[in-house]
């Protein structure tokens, strides 16, 4: 039959046929005995709609069919769906709703297929809502709007039951909450406004009740365990049935009620708060505290503050113990005091190791805790002990590790590790320049008197110091180490020179260490009147050195020299290891049996202080090479001295110590002088770049520039500005 001869279908007749298909679909949904749709059934229903929409006006029934499509849903909902839901309550109502929603979606899918032609042409041309949307809107307007309040309350009630430990049907809740999401057709408004807001409010109230009991009953660790557990459970809840967008909001509510509200009470609990956890080394609880408090705004501030207080207190106790120990030992030997200070540095290193591990393990290397540790150590590391600054203590500690025969007996690895830790501690010392000067003095003694145990360790710590404080900090020290290598080569050349010119040999074995003045600490160089034998040595070396360079002037530092003398005593001949000063004094007795204090002083051309020290070491100390009249323990200008020919000792070779001059005062004076230069240079640098600058700002910039090496004194900056 041709198209134009097609029989017209009127509305009633066509709709009656469609009604049969719709009733069949409803029966299937209601579970009544009904055969499934065959492809012929489907094609007949689809074709009927197609024909009714493509007839010439006034028989084009597109609009009427579009309305009847919606009415089909409305009629089914009003007659069947709503009554079945209204008679059920709580969980049963939820199950019914899930079933009805699933059925409704099936009905929408089938009917929108039957009426598909409307979607393709009529709806597109008129800009009307598509069939799928119309079907879902019917459910939303008639079922959802009436029941969402009851559904929400039932769901929240089940969630609370689960929180109390009851078993609930999580799959059911997931399906119900999916309705809230799906009904929004791409938007989350219905889920958020009709369910989530109330659920969050209920959550807050629930945990507020719980937390108010826990805070009274539980210790801090127990409370935190409960808090962590309930956060874990809420997260789990989201993964099982709540929408993923609820997670941050839900956790925020729980964190607020359980942690934020009681943060201070929890941290300050008397026997179990943060102080107690730190005191008792409760590493696991501290890790939990960090995890929990890092989740709440500014939650870590009080924790890091307590951590700082605790570390400061622990360090201050170490300082006090060291002070007490030092003052108790003052009456005893001096070296015991030194030992106490070594123990103190060791304990500070151990303390730093311990709390650095806390920062990395418990507090996940958080910057707040690194800052707290730094500030705590800066407090007590700059206090010093028994009149010695921390800068000096650290330098002495390093010296003790690096010199031969130090009290620390460590393996190479342990030495490296300890030096690494000392350099870390140096970061907290404000007077780094003072450390540098003390370290340089002690390094000089190790290098010049061959006291250094291992060259590799010496270089290694310089590398570490360079990384920590910059190249300028270690440039002189590196120069000193290099000087020693060059000096050894120089000595070899000198020995070669003497073997080539035997006439030049002074008859005494001579070792000279040539150093670069700028690298080494400044030493007093007096014009000691050398004995004739030694004068010849000096001249021979000077001639040799001039063959190597014409442009360098040698300045002899006799105070650092040593000599080996043969002492011919009546009981036996002995070798004496002495300083150049001591040797010069003893050699005077080769030509005189008895000499007065003033004669010795005049012949040596030394100061009073040096002569007293020198004669004391030879006549009043352990080895009495000289006899003194009167025989007292102190040296006075009226004393007389003569060679003690009866002297003897069980050893054939003895070293006669000359106590070193206390250099602490000089080091501090030198550092002060350098600081004044540094301040002046800083002011000039700043003003060159800025041209004009306010006084206060200049002072602040100066402090900032110099702060890496020392804390400049404001008065010193002001006096620098007057120049």
Image (cartoon, grey):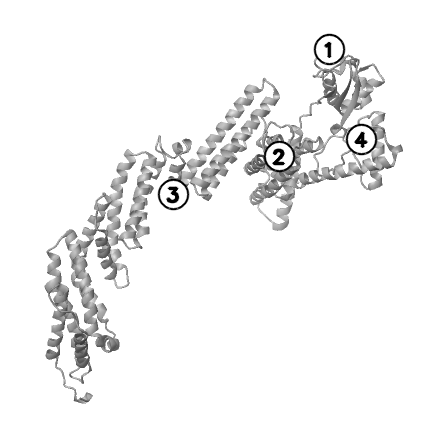
Q: Which residue is mark 4?
A: 510
At x 78%, y 38%, the residue is 490
Q: Quadrant of the N terminus?
A: bottom left
Q: Give the number of the disc on residue 434.
A: 2
Which of marks 3 and 2 precedes in the sequence? 3
Q: Residue furthest right?
A: 503
Q: Image height check: is 32 above or below 166?
A: below
x, y percentage for residue 76?
A: 13, 66
- On the rendered structure, is 518 left or right of 252? right
Which of marks 1 and 3 precedes in the sequence? 3
Which of marks 4 and 2 precedes in the sequence? 2
Disc 3 to disc 1: CB gap under 8 Å: no
Residue 287 vs residue 40, the one in the foreground:
40
Which of marks 3 and 4 precedes in the sequence? 3
Mark 1, other Cα within 10 Å: few <14 / some 14–19 / many ≥20: few
Disc 2 to disc 3: CB gap under 8 Å: no
Q: Secondary structure at mark 1?
A: loop
Residue 508 vs residue 55, the one in the foreground:
508
Q: Which residue is mark 3?
A: 291
């Amino acid at each position: 039959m041709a198209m134009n001869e097609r029989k017209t279908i009127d509305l009633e007749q066509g709709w009656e046929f469609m009604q049969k298909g719709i009733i069949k679909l409803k029966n299937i949904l209601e579970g009544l005995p009904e055969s499934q749709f065959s492809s012929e059934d489907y094609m007949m229903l689809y074709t009927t709609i197609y024909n009714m929409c493509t007839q010439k006006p006034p028989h084009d029934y597109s609009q009427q069919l579009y309305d009847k499509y919606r009415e089909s849903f409305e009629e089914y909902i009003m007659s069947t769906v709503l009554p079945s839901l209204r008679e059920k309550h709580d969980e049963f109502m939820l199950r019914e709703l899930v079933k009805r929603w699933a059925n409704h979606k099936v009905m929408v899918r089938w009917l929108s297929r039957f009426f598909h032609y409307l979607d393709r042409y009529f709806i597109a041309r008129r800009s009307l809502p598509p069939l799928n949307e119309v079907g879902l809107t019917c459910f939303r307007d008639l079922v959802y709007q009436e029941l969402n309040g009851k559904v929400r309350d039932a769901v929240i009630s089940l969630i609370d039951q689960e929180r109390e430990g009851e078993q609930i049907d999580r799959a059911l809740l997931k399906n119900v909450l999916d309705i809230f999401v799906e009904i929004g057709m791409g938007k989350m408004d219905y889920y958020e406004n009709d369910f989530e807001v109330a659920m969050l409010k209920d959550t807050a109230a629930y945990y507020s009740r719980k937390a108010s009991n826990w805070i009274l009953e539980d210790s801090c660790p127990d409370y935190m365990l409960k808090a962590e557990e309930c956060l874990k459970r809420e997260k789990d809840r989201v993964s099982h049935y709540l929408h993923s967008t609820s997670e941050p909001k839900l956790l925020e509510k729980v964190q607020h009620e359980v942690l934020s509200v009681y943060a201070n009470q929890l941290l300050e609990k008397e026997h179990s708060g943060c102080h107690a956890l730190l005191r008792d080394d409760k590493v696991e609880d501290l890790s939990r505290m960090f995890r929990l408090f890092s989740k709440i705004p500014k939650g870590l501030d009080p924790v890091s503050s307590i951590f700082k207080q605790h570390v400061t207190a622990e360090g201050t106790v170490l300082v006090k113990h060291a002070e007490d120990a030092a003052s108790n030992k003052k009456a005893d030997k001096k070296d015991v005091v030194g030992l106490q200070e070594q123990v103190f540095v060791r304990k500070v290193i151990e303390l730093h190791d311990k709390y650095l591990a806390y920062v990395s393990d418990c507090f996940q290397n958080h910057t707040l805790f690194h800052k707290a540790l730094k500030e705590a150590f800066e407090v007590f590391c700059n206090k010093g002990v028994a009149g010695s600054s921390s800068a000096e203590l650290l330098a002495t500690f390093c010296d003790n590790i690096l010199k031969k025969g130090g009290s620390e007996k460590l393996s190479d690895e342990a030495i490296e590790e300890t030096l690494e830790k000392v350099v870390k501690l140096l970061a907290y010392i404000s007077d780094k320049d003072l450390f540098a000067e003390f370290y340089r003095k002690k390094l000089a003694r190790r290098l010049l008197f061959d006291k250094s145990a291992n060259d590799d360790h010496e270089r290694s710590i310089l590398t570490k110091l360079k990384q920590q404080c910059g190249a300028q900090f270690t440039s002189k020290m590196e120069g000193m180490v290099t000087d020693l290598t060059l000096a050894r080569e120089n000595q070899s050349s000198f020995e070669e020179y003497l073997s080539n010119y035997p006439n030049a040999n002074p008859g005494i074995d001579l070792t000279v260490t040539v150093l670069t003045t700028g690298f080494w600490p400044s030493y007093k160089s007096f014009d000691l009147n050398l004995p004739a034998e030694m004068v010849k040595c000096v001249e021979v070396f000077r001639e040799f050195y001039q063959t190597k360079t014409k442009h360098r002037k040698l300045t002899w530092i006799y105070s650092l020299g040593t000599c080996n003398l043969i002492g011919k005593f009546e009981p036996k001949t002995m070798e004496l290891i002495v300083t150049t000063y001591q040797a010069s004094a003893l050699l005077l007795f080769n030509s005189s049996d008895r000499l007065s204090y003033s004669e010795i002083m005049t012949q040596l051309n030394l100061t009073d202080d040096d002569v007293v020290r020198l004669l004391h070491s030879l006549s009043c100390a352990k080895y009495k090479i000289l006899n003194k009249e009167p025989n007292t323990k102190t040296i006075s200008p009226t004393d007389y001295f003569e060679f003690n020919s009866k002297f003897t000792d069980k050893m054939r070779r003895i070293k006669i110590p000359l106590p070193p001059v206390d250099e602490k005062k000089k080091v501090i004076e030198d550092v002060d002088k350098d600081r004044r230069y540094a301040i002046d240079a800083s002011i000039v640098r700043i003003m060159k770049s800025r041209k004009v600058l306010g006084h206060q700002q200049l002072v602040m910039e100066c402090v900032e520039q110099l702060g890496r090496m020392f804390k400049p004194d404001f008065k010193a900056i002001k006096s620098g500005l007057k120049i």
